[in-house]
Amino acid sequence: MNSMTTAPLSSLIPGGLGSLQTLCDDSSITEVMVVAGRHVWVEQRGHLRRAGELMQGEFDILVERLLRSRVDVMSPIVEARLPDNSRLCVVLPPVSVDGGSLNIRRFSSTVRDLEQFCTQREAAILRQAVCEQRNIVVSGATSSGKTSLLASLATLIDDSERVVCIEDTAELPLHCGHLVRLEGRPANVEGNGRITMQTLVRTALRLRPDRIVVGEVRGEEVVDMLTALHTGHRGCWTTCHSTSLHDTPRRLATMALSNHRGWNSDVANDMVRSSVDVIVHMQRHGEQRSVAAIGAFEAMSDGNLRLIRIDD
């Protein structure tokens, strides 16, 4: 497993981070943002605030130090993992209209107790789902606590189980006894060498997993994920962006339809309903992330499946 380093980020970047150095070393700041190549904003304790200005030309120097020429006008969008496991996203003109944009999103190596996200009843439901190797989807908006909840659930996995974790950018602080971590890779400046999440999902199935954890499904990998679950692979988890508990199956089905021309809406919806056992929807209020609802699919008298809340 890749360890989460405790060294300050600025000390891990050759040349340091200039005006961003103090901000990136402040553990209370969870996101550092540069807007229009100059204006600096941060998220601190759940709130956004303006934090200063970069000097003329400093943005370009920072991008060079962080990415080492992996971004240019021909490849103006880059996502990367920094040495401390923070996630970096850089967008350059002409895509970023008013000037370069930079986001550094930091992740804590501390795994929270399950009860910090939910009530005791909800925690008991989730523990039972893990124990019974249910397939779980954690949904919610950006920064609603999806990754943090997965990390907490992972502490319940028995050390004898082989877990294969797949992420486009490694960030999940999983503490499992038998863990294989796979990370996607973007194409290089020549457009070669890309390793997609879809490829990693297929690879994971050949690595004899007891459980597969996909950090987030966004596109074509959802088809392979649902196919794996539909063929009987148990105890798999993933996250996805959605607006509510009941929107999550529609979101998964829509992604599947967009990436598998051989499926119609009935097939996609059936794959989701028959593959996913439990959906946990997360919400955020300020600095607090919590479980908003837990749902499961229940068989109806006509043989169809419907999503019902099981945490009421």
Image (cartoon, rainbow, N blue to C red):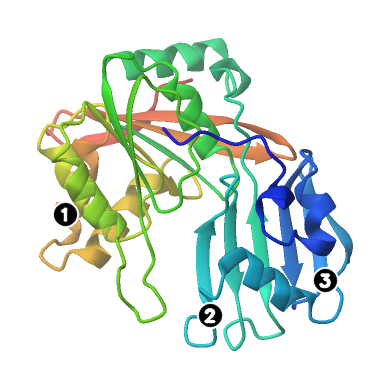
Mark 3 or 2 closer to N-term?
Answer: 3
Which image quadrant is residue 88 in? Answer: bottom right
Q: Amino acid at mark 1?
A: Asp
Q: Are marks 1 and 2 in contact (CB under 8 Å)?
A: no
**Kind of residue at badge 3:** His
Observer able to see residue 307:
yes
Mark 1 to mark 2 CA distance (whole Å): 38 Å
- Return the x and y of residue 201 as percentages of the image width and height: 23, 48
Crowding near the residue tagged with mark 1, few <14, some 14–19, many ≥20 C-alpha atoms within 10 Å:
few
Question: 167 or 129: which is nearer to us?
Answer: 167
Residue 122: which numbered mark, if any?
A: none
For the point 36% across and 71% down, which residue is it? Answer: 187
- The secondary element bearing badge 3 is classed as strand
Q: Quadrant location of residue 59? A: bottom right
- Compared with residue 2, is residue 115 higher up or lower down, i.e. above or below? above
Say whether residue 15 is left or right of residue 241.
right
Which residue is disc 2 drawn over?
A: 76
Q: Nearer the viewer, residue 297 or 101?
A: 101
Q: Label 1: which residue?
A: 266
Q: Residue at x 14, y 39 (%)?
A: 230
> Mark 3 packing: few (<14 Cα in 10 Å), some, or many (20+)?
some
Residue 39: image tag:
3
Across and down, in percent, residue 212 comes to 27, 35
Mark 3–mark 1 distance (CA, rounded to whole Å):
48 Å
Q: Earlier in the sequence, mark 3 or mark 1?
A: 3
Secondary element under disc 1, as helix, strand or loop, is helix
| Alpha-carbon span between mark 3 and mark 2 | 19 Å
The picture places residue 235, in percent across and down from the top left corner, at: 26, 26
Mark sitting earlier along the chain (1/2) = 2
